[in-house]
Amino acid sequence: MADIREVAKRANVSISTVSRVLGGTTRVVEEKRARVLAAINELDYRPNVSAQSLKGIRTRTIGLVIPNVRNLVLPAAIRGVEDVARNHGYAVVLCNTDEDSDKEQFYIKTLKSRLIDGFLFTTAKTTSSNIKELQAEGFPVMLLLRELDDQSHAVVLDHYNGAYQATNYLISRGLTRIGLVNGSLDIKLYEERYAGYRSALKEAGLKVPEEAVVHGIDGGIEAYRAATRILLNRVEVDAFFATSDDKALGVMRAIKDLGLAIPEDISVIGFDNADIALLLDPPLTTVAQPLYEMGAAACRQLIEMIEAKQPVTPEIQRFPAEVVIRNSVK
Amino acid sequence: MADIREVAKRANVSISTVSRVLGGTTRVVEEKRARVLAAINELDYRPNVSAQSLKGIRTRTIGLVIPNVRNLVLPAAIRGVEDVARNHGYAVVLCNTDEDSDKEQFYIKTLKSRLIDGFLFTTAKTTSSNIKELQAEGFPVMLLLRELDDQSHAVVLDHYNGAYQATNYLISRGLTRIGLVNGSLDIKLYEERYAGYRSALKEAGLKVPEEAVVHGIDGGIEAYRAATRILLNRVEVDAFFATSDDKALGVMRAIKDLGLAIPEDISVIGFDNADIALLLDPPLTTVAQPLYEMGAAACRQLIEMIEAKQPVTPEIQRFPAEVVIRNSVK
DNA sequence: CTGAAAGCGCTTACAG
DNA sequence: CTGAAAGCGCTTACAG
């Protein structure tokens, strides 16, 4: 690729002038500006990001740290992030941590040495301090889907209310023995969904069927095993609240494998409204999380933080949850 | 972060020496080397990638260009890519093109100005020359999942044989009126899967039921509509071959919505063996594509190309396809 | 084996 | 408004 000297030569100006028309901050006489622009065009010149970054200019690159692309939820959020990044000229580096704090630490290190402008995490956990340390060092950090505390910028769902609504919906359909297949309580949102579930039961005068409640479940296969175990133990259950759609998928498979019908014998409600939820059998009733929009909002706010001169005060953007009614609940 | 001068000062050597112990190519006297290593450790020093890249050193960053993360297949391949990238100290920048040649072009440009070491594409199309041009400029380019021609390095499946096997399996189960829900013929692999399907039918003395064959379908929703249309037209069909699992999901939904049973009334076979295939209802019989392994292999070969001194001769690695039998076929 | 110096491609005070 | 020069953090001939 052409460099700034070639452009300068072709336009018959100094490299300083080329740099100035590119930067757009200083006045450049119209005639020269036009020549420079022409030269840039003809040579298809793009400034070398590494050279710019050495001078303290933004790299326009952000690091997106997630547990694992390979699930039903994250891809939609990633698209949201990426689309606004692209529209602002930013590139995004993808990192999968598998919920492993050491991997996360490793990625933070490599991203730092690559002079990333900011970080977007969907891996926040109460048990890890990686993110807090990074913030303390002054890096722009945004949290997405999972929050940490009110010292961090975050875009999240109102998980408590979503779970509360889901449970209430089941109750409104006459269901009373509602099992819960939940994720790890180290992750705040699963704690909140658990809390919303309990509140709804309590308000309705129902008690939590402890034998039909499991936490720490990750993905469809684990959910399948958990639900099978509960059902095989002859725990009486007329509905399951699975706190993610992939868990719901596993729970549904388990119910059917035992010869039971959905929703006639057991109802199932999920969480996320993943792209495939409406194609499942039966189409899955679930709590919608506007994943794409949340990813987009988080990326927008991160870029704002990056480009702001002064530090922005931490803000938590909480999206409302909504039950999408389909056919998996009686 | 600390820079090389601080390390040099602390270790009481010149910055050249620090650079040398880092590079590992030149001998450095053991005593100094130890001091430098200690200083690096104490300061948690990592060389500035931008500065290195300005000197012509690899950035250890690759661009991964895909149509859209938001589907059932790509995430697994991405994980394969990312895992081997991480193991070699590479970062990966993710780009979604939506099959749009202009977006692809845009990404190629931005990635170039970021001094990416190499490119990995899963977007190869016979109708676009973006990739060929990039190759002509001498950039290391790897193709994944989709190939272009024998001038390009690629890691792909034996699509023809996979489709041939799938169709043959249906035939072996006594099915004779086999519809096809296929992707765009601009993409070579869908052409190949189409060819495999036709060959199997032909060998069995069956003819292609043209009214039950559609191309250009992308995703579950479109597949749902296409299958519904075929069925509503009263085309007689006893099986569908959907050339991806997300299409199969839509086809299954369409069949059930019309009150038909799978596989009793109509059998369905998919392609990919996506993570959720075994949790569907019924569990989906499909052609397995080792997505994770293919992603890993492609990334491995790309890094090899990047780090090779001399140009590597184009090689196409073709993985074998395999039918995974579950319960969606009679 | 190792230090001082040049230079990678830029941006930005500093003069004019 | 604009050019020459310094310098961002590195690597690597060049001497010694």
Image (tube, coloured by chain):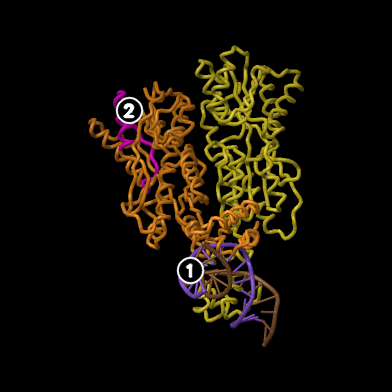
Chain colours: A orange, B yellow, C purple, D brown
The circle on residue A170 is 2
Callout 2: helix, strand or loop? helix
Q: Quadrant of residue A141?
A: bottom left
Q: Tell which of A307 and A39 is nearer to you.
A: A39
x and y percent of residue A40 in the render? 61, 54
Can residue B217 be seen in this snapshot? yes
Q: Residues within 10 Å of mark 2 (few under 14, many from 20)?
A: many
Judging by the rendered image, the residue that carries numbered circle 1 is B44
Q: Please identify the quarter of the rendering in which residue B50 is found.
A: bottom right
User: Residue A37: image x %, image y %?
Assistant: 58, 53
* Residue that lies at the very extreme toward the top in this rendered image: B234
| Left or right of residue A299: residue A179 | left
Q: Give me the residue at 45% from left, 55% from top.
A: A118
Question: Does the magenta segment cover residue B209?
Answer: no
> Residue at image x 58%, y 39%?
B67
Q: Spatial distance from mark 2 to mark 1, Cα to Cα?
A: 53 Å
Q: Is residue B49 visible?
A: no
Mark 2: which amino acid? Leu
Q: Secondary structure at mark 1?
A: loop
> Percent from the top left, x then y, of residue B229?
57, 17
B319 sits to left or right of A322: right
- The stretch of residues the image draws in magenta is A161-187
Q: Quadrant of residue B310?
A: bottom right
* Chain at numbered mark 1: B
Q: Amino acid at mark 1?
A: Asp
